[in-house]
Amino acid sequence: MLRCYIGLGSNQGDSKSIIAEVLKKLNGSTGIEVTGVAPLYRTAPQGYLEQDDFINTVAEINTTLSPLALLSALQQIETDLGRVRTVRWGPRTVDLDLLLYGDETIILPKLQVPHPRMHQRAFVMVPLADLNKELELSGERVSVTAKRLAGEQRIVKLDDMRLS
Ligand code: X6L
Ligand code: MG
Ligand code: MG
């Protein structure tokens, strides 16, 4: 049994409902148990800027699946939820990224873990730090990285917006 972290993002359709649906499908998948979900965040689009804000979060799972079996389970859920690949870095109903697979390093043509750019992205590191403050990545605590990135990139916890 391995502890893994999955990045979730959506900026097309009813992103909150889509993420709820994804979490149900993840937890219902053979060999995957969702053990935690960070708060939802509204985040500025990165890479391709002319698109709507994203809703992002991170899920913590236990899995008995191999990395590639887990990757195909994630891709199947993306397809089930109607993801269509058009513009590179463009809008998507849902994106599921395998961020961490235990403490393993995986370098395959179609899968790199830890996700090679996660430590640069507030929309990954901030929810990851919510789930596990002790976690370290390339020698730095994720909570430290997350604080720095949150000061540089636009990211707002959704619950913080309820009273506004
Ligand atoms: C320069 C060049 C600076 C490229 C940044 C960053 C590219 C992130 C792609 C980049 C660059 C990405 C999400 C997103 C995407 C998401 C938010 C990507 C892949 N996915 N923006 N942009 N949330 N906020 O989930 O992450 S496309
Ligand atoms: Mg992504
Ligand atoms: Mg992806």
Image (cartoon, rainbow, N blue to C red):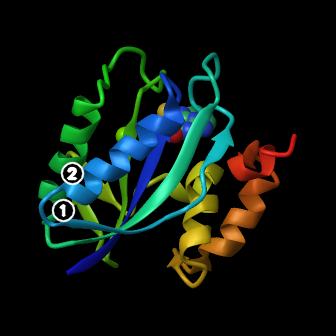
Q: Where, by quadrant of the figure, is residue 124 drawn? A: bottom right
Residue closer to the observer: 9 or 137 = 9
Q: Where, by quadrant of the figure, is residue 1 drawn? A: bottom left
Contact flag, marks 1 and 2 (Cβ < 8 Å): yes
Q: Type of residue at label 1?
A: Pro
Residue 7 numbered tag: none
Residue beneath the point at 28% across and 35% down: 78
Residue beneath the point at 52% across and 38% down: 16
Looking at the image, can residue 10 be seen? Answer: no
Residue beneath the point at 30% across and 31% down: 81
Q: Is residue 142 above or below residue 44?
A: below
Regarding mark 2 in the picture, which secondary structure is present there? Answer: helix
Q: Type of residue at label 2?
A: Leu
Q: Is residue 125 above or below residue 90?
A: below
Percent from the top left, x then y, of residue 125? 59, 60
**Residue bearing mark 1:** 67
Percent from the top left, x then y, of residue 35? 38, 72
In-image side of 6 versus 105 (left or right): right
Looking at the image, can residue 95 be seen? Answer: yes
Residue beneath the point at 60% across and 19% down: 51
Q: CA distance from mark 1 to mark 2?
A: 6 Å
**Residue bearing mark 2:** 71
Q: Residues within 10 Å of mark 1 (few under 14, many from 20)?
A: some
